[in-house]
Image: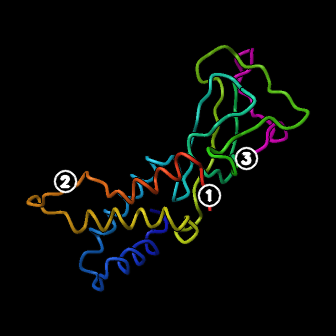
Amino acid sequence: MADGSQALEEVKEYLRVTSTYEDDLLTLLIDAAVGYVEMSTNKTLASKSYTQYCDYFIDTIALDHSPLTSVTSINYIDTDGNSQLLSSSVYSENSASAPSEINLAYGQSWPATRDVKNAVTIVYSAGYATWTVVPELLRQAVKFLVGHWYMNREAASNIKIEDVPLTVNCIITKYKDTGYYI
């Protein structure tokens, strides 16, 4: 996670771990838990850059990762087969929707694209700037997962490492199904 030191300190406080002896293990568990929460919710916790492809333009393009931070560029292949950069005045960014969207701006029209696979390429950033601005419930889901995996890491345990605490699934369902943002 890009902002790992803040996450590590918060997780250590949650687990009541005071030494640095297992920081490497906790960092690996945090990364795994963040990945699990991101995959399960389609929300990006740590800011990242993504590339998404579309075959053509539609009025509303739902992005695979939220919350949208910014659109870096939108390129498309025109009907003559040439790559073109789309002006940002043609579209608007909607980070409040779940999932985040790119919409056609008022009074604009999408350009025609060549009838080929992946004619539109969108490069954008999504995620939260720092760990402390990640919604509290998502941070809590990460801490629950890390705590679960940290306390149940022995092969002799009756609990499987892949089992996920009910609380984590409840938080994920809340964020995934409703697009709830804090």
Query: Which residue is labeled 1 in the image?
Result: 181
Tally of numbered discs: 3
Which of label 3 and label 2 is nearer to you? 2
Select label 1 or label 3 by which is in front.
1
Earlier residue among tags 1 and 3: 3
Numbered circle sitting on residue 94? 3
Q: Quick check: marks 2 and 1 in contact, CB under 8 Å?
A: no
Compared across the picture, whether 90 is left or right of 99 comes to right
What separation in Å lies between label 3 and label 2 (alpha carbons)?
40 Å
Label 3 sits on a secondary structure element that is strand
Residue 50 drawn above or below residue 54:
below
Task: Look at label 3 and name its amino acid.
Answer: Asn
Q: Check the image and name the residue furthest to the left.
A: 156
The boundaries of the magenta stretch are: 77-93
Residue at the spot 41% in from the left edge and 78% down from the top edge? 9
Question: Three-letter amino acid code at disc 1?
Answer: Tyr
Left or right: 8 as drawn, with respect to 61 = left
